[in-house]
Amino acid sequence: MLVSEIRRLQLRHHGRPRIHAALRAEGHRCSRGRVERLMRRHHIRARAGRRFQPFTTDSRHLLAVAPNLLAQCFEAAAPNRVWLADLT
């Protein structure tokens, strides 16, 4: 009965906590363990989420390159004239 309810609610790829909450919201009284056993018996498994893949710098963009204002001359004429930053 609960397995057909799981399929009717289209929860085949959700895990036990979501399925349990959805069944309780529909008015079914069942324990978390029972939902887990039924899922195992009927080979209903949660779909694992994708691993986070960070996006690195896109060096092949079409934007203009910042001008080299120092021209490799690192000696400033006075204090607070030249500021540098390192973005590594």
Image (tube, helix red, strand yellow):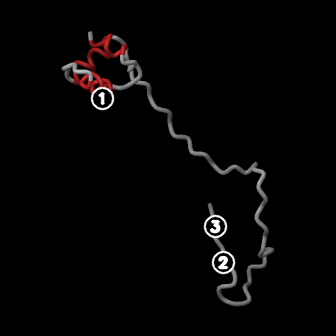
Callout 2: SS: loop
The amino acid type of the residue labelled 1 equals Pro
Q: Nearer the viewer, residue 49 or 75?
A: 49
Judging by the rendered image, the residue that carries numbered circle 1 is 17
Mark in front: 3 vs 1? 1
The quarter of the displayed image where residue 23 is located: top left
**Residue 43 in the image, given as x and y percentages of width and height:** 37, 13
State the SS at label 3: loop
Q: As rendered, which of 21 and 26 lies closer to the eye?
A: 26
Q: Name the residue rendered at 33%, 16% in the picture.
A: 6
Left or right of 81 on screen, residue 55: left
Q: Within 10 angstroms of label 3, few (less than 14), some, or many (20 or more) residues? A: few
Q: Residue at x 31, y 24 (%)?
A: 19
* Local secondary structure at mark 1: helix
- The residue pinned by badge 3 equals 86
Q: Which residue is mark 2?
A: 83
The disc at residue 37 is: none
N-terminal of the pair, mark 3 or mark 1, is 1
Residue 28 image position (x, y, % from top left): 22, 19
